Image: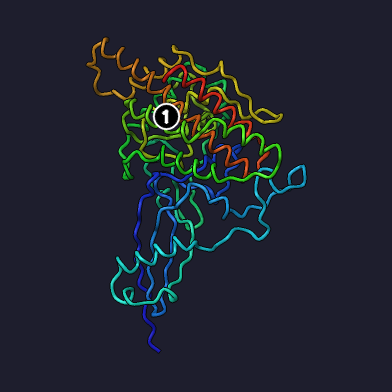
């Protein structure tokens, strides 16, 4: 018997959102590895086989940042009132591996259009498709580049199941340490170095609203069964979030912000305080957890970081976080961050006049505080979804409401 060798073709398409991710570093956010992806690089791998022994492998963009709620198969405890809606929806049979018809039809059409030979003539009944997640190689590309530029831990090796990276002894950073001027200035410098990088990824800034739009679609389709969740969900829906999203989109469209390579999650949990460093050193800190990183509007990194000054996720009582609106950085604290950022970003050119510097700083204050609105909106939507699918003990619905309350207060000040 003559056996034809399989023929493989891979097509990588960058996701329009530039990223699919859940912050793994924020354990409180209930991230599950299945829901995680990274930058614009996580794609859905489709293996297509035909009856004549030829096959093609395509990598297609994931349709959602998280698995569609209807397809998620994460067992969970029952709610306190006996329904199945505690912090996750329960499916006893595990995750589905089925492919929806739309995805199957599109994949089959792409095979016919892009591949020659028998792909043009095979019947759809002979077409097989399987799904897997294949982000390791591309994630490791980013990790290796960051390591080479000393912006991340060293990368020692990559293998099919994962990678080996440098362990850096460190102390946990606490939220209140973000207020320390010396720490804030070093964080600003690290962010500036990150923003100066040129990375071999999709440079279109689609991450932010691509993410928010997908979250919004999921939120509007959620169905809660527990009475407490239903009440909180209905209360959140009174904000008329779709209309508010249109308003936010218009506001940010009128807010200049350059596109740079952003970390997108500069929180205290993603900053290592390295052990054995001189307290006066400017190399005490290291950013980690790059799975959200992508090209994005600079203002989001600023605004998102400033928002994180307000939230302590180590609180040991329900809802397991503490919000402190008065901890949002003052004008002077924001200027301190911005000035240190600009000093690092412009290492090789400092010919700007003082008047121009002042104007730029004022513009960046507006930029940061308007993009803080996007941070509130994104994580507010995210938290509503987590209230449905997460098994982590955390007040996700309370946190969502807290973020949207902060959003509307911030909007009054900076719209």
- Specify the farthest residue to the top: 355
Q: Quadrant of the image for the N terminus?
A: bottom left
Question: Horizontal placement of 415 versus 343: left or right?
Answer: right
Q: Position of residue 215 (x, y in %)?
A: 50, 42
Point 26% across, 13% down: residue: 356
Residue 367 higher or lower than 356, as above or below: below
Task: Please name the residue that numbered disc 1 is placed on.
Answer: 247
Dividing the picture into quadrants, the one containing residue 220 is top right
Residue situated in front as seen by the camera: 172 or 245: 245
Residue situated in front as seen by the camera: 128 or 213: 213
Point 33% across, 18% down: residue: 363
Residue 379 higher or lower than 42, as above or below: above
Question: Does any portion of residue 287 appear in the rendered image?
Answer: no
Q: Position of residue 232 (x, y in %)?
A: 64, 34
Question: Horizontal placement of 403 versus 17: left or right?
Answer: right
Q: Quadrant of the image for the C terminus?
A: top left
Question: Horizontal placement of 5 versus 279: left or right?
Answer: left
Question: Does any portion of residue 359 appear in the rendered image?
Answer: yes
Could you tell me which secondary element the residue under label 1 belongs to? helix
């Amino acid at each position: 018997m003559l056996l034809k060798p399989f023929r493989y073709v891979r097509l990588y398409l960058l996701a329009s959102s530039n990223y699919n991710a859940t912050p793994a570093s924020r354990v409180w956010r209930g991230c599950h590895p299945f829901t995680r992806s990274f930058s614009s690089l996580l794609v859905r791998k489709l293996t297509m086989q035909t009856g004549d022994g030829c096959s093609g492998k395509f990598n297609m963009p994931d349709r959602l940042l998280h698995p569609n709620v209807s397809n998620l198969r994460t067992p969970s405890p029952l709610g306190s009132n006996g329904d199945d809606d505690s912090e996750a929806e329960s499916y006893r049979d595990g995750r589905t591996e089925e492919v929806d018809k739309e995805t199957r039809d599109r994949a089959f059409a792409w095979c016919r259009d892009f591949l020659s030979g028998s792909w043009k003539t095979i019947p759809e009944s002979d077409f097989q498709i399987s799904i897997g997640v294949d982000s390791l190689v591309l994630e490791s590309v980013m990790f290796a580049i960051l390591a080479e530029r000393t912006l991340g831990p060293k990368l020692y090796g990559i293998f099919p199941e994962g990678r080996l990276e440098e362990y850096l002894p460190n102390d946990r950073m606490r939220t209140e340490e973000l207020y320390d001027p010396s720490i804030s200035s070093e964080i600003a410098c690290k962010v500036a170095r990150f923003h100066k990088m040129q990375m071999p990824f999709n440079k279109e800034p689609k991450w932010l609203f691509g993410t928010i739009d997908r979250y919004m679609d999921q939120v509007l389709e959620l169905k809660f069964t527990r009475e407490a969740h239903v009440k909180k969900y209905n209360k959140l829906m009174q904000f008329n979030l779709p209309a508010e999203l249109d308003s936010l989109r218009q506001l940010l469209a009128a807010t200049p912000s350059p596109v740079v390579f952003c970390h997108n999650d500069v929180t205290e949990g993603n900053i290592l305080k390295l052990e054995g460093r001189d307290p006066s050193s400017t190399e005490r800190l290291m950013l980690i957890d790059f799975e959200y990183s992508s090209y994005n509007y600079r203002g989001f990194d600023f605004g998102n970081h400033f928002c994180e000054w307000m939230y302590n996720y180590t609180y040991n009582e329900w809802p397991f976080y503490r919000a402190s609106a008065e901890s949002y950085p003052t004008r002077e604290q924001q200027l301190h961050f911005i000035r240190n950022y600009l000093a690092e970003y412009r290492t090789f050119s400092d010919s700007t006049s003082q008047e121009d510097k002042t104007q730029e700083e004022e513009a960046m204050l507006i930029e940061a505080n308007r993009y803080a609105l996007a941070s509130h909106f994104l994580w507010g939507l995210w938290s509503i979804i987590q209230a449905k699918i997460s098994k982590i003990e955390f007040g996700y619905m309370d946190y969502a409401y807290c973020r949207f309350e902060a959003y509307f207060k911030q909007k009054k000040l900076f719209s």
